[in-house]
Image (tube, helix red, strand yellow):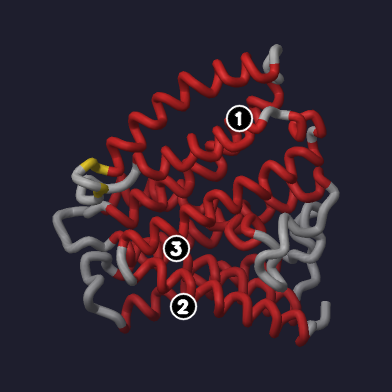
Amino acid sequence: MALNTAVFKTRALSALVFVALMLLGLLWNFWSFFVLFSVIHFGCWYEYQRIITRVYPPYGNIPVFHRYGVMVAGWCIMLFFTGPSYSILGLPLHTIGYWLGLVSLLILPLGAAVFSGRPDLVAIRYSLLGLLYISLSWGLLVFMRSNYFGGFVNIGKWLVLLIIASIWINDTMAYIVGSLIGKTPLTRISPKKTWEGTLGGILLSVATLLVAAYMITEPIDAISILPWGIIAAIAAIAGTFGDLLESKLKRMADIKDSGAILPGHGGFLDRFDSLLLATPFVWIYVVLFLK
């Protein structure tokens, strides 16, 4: 597969914009991060519901109450996972998310019964899957960004930056390596992906982050070199599966892109599919081994 220079330039420019926005939201402060990922959360939900409607047409007939209520319920999950230091008018975001979430659990089923008569259990199942796929992942990312680990300084922002950098490097390098030497198809789900590109992207991602860990000692010396490599590997591998999962959903829906928000990358889900699946696995490692 020959390297398409025009496509690569478009993807690279979009990736730079993505990185700039992530750095702004991540490094400025927690609030900028939370606002940024709240927007991403609702964007992902909009596209997810669009895809599910094509996979299961009756989903398009769910009441407005259900359609937007499940988005708000998912946002409550993000609120719940914020750290104890973040509050509005003295009320912790964690507490707000907890109580709004409980209210949602009570009101959503009642509202579905009132507005739709007989609830569509298949549609409800897809909405619950969306809460796990989208909202829980972003909630865990918020958790890592807003909490402290191991008695060190708040390294949450560096953890999230490390995950994003690992995925971005893996995505870029997999495309380059696959375009130059890729010959063996990885899977029918995504015909353009090759084993050579996939393995090359993962290895180069880990190698790049290990070199960065060796060169940078402050302010993130709380994360030693080995965890950098492990997190990079987890993010790159899980992120690859996240990309394939979203590709499978799009094939089921018979669409090329989930949206058109990012030129060369498609929509929110197209851009953040890897991060959605990588986040829970990195979170497990962080909580078990870095706390």
Left or right for 243, reference 144 = right
Please report the residue visible at 41 percent of the width from the left and 67 percent of the height from the top.
Answer: 25
Q: How many residues crowd around disc 1 within 10 Å: few (fewer than 14), some, or many (20 or more)?
A: some
Which label lies toward us, 2 or 3? Answer: 3
Please report the residue visible at 73 percent of the width from the left and 39 percent of the height from the top.
Answer: 52
Rounded to the nearest angstrom, the CA distance separating label 1 from label 3 is 35 Å
Name, please, the residue furthest toward the left. Answer: 151
The answer to which quarter of the image holds residue 203 is bottom right
From where the camera sits, is residue 277 visible? no
Q: Which residue is mark 1?
A: 65
The answer to which quarter of the image holds residue 184 is bottom right
Q: Observer-nearest residue: 264 or 289? A: 264
Tell me the SS state at disc 3: helix
- Tell which circle, 2 or 3, labels the residue nearer the N-terminal end: 3
Q: Position of residue 183 (x, y in %)?
A: 80, 71
Left or right for 185, reference 24 = right
Q: Which residue is mark 3?
A: 163
Q: Observer-nearest residue: 184 or 155? A: 155
Q: Which residue is mark 2?
A: 208
Left or right for 279, reference 143 = right
Mark 3 and mark 1 in contact (Cβ < 8 Å)? no
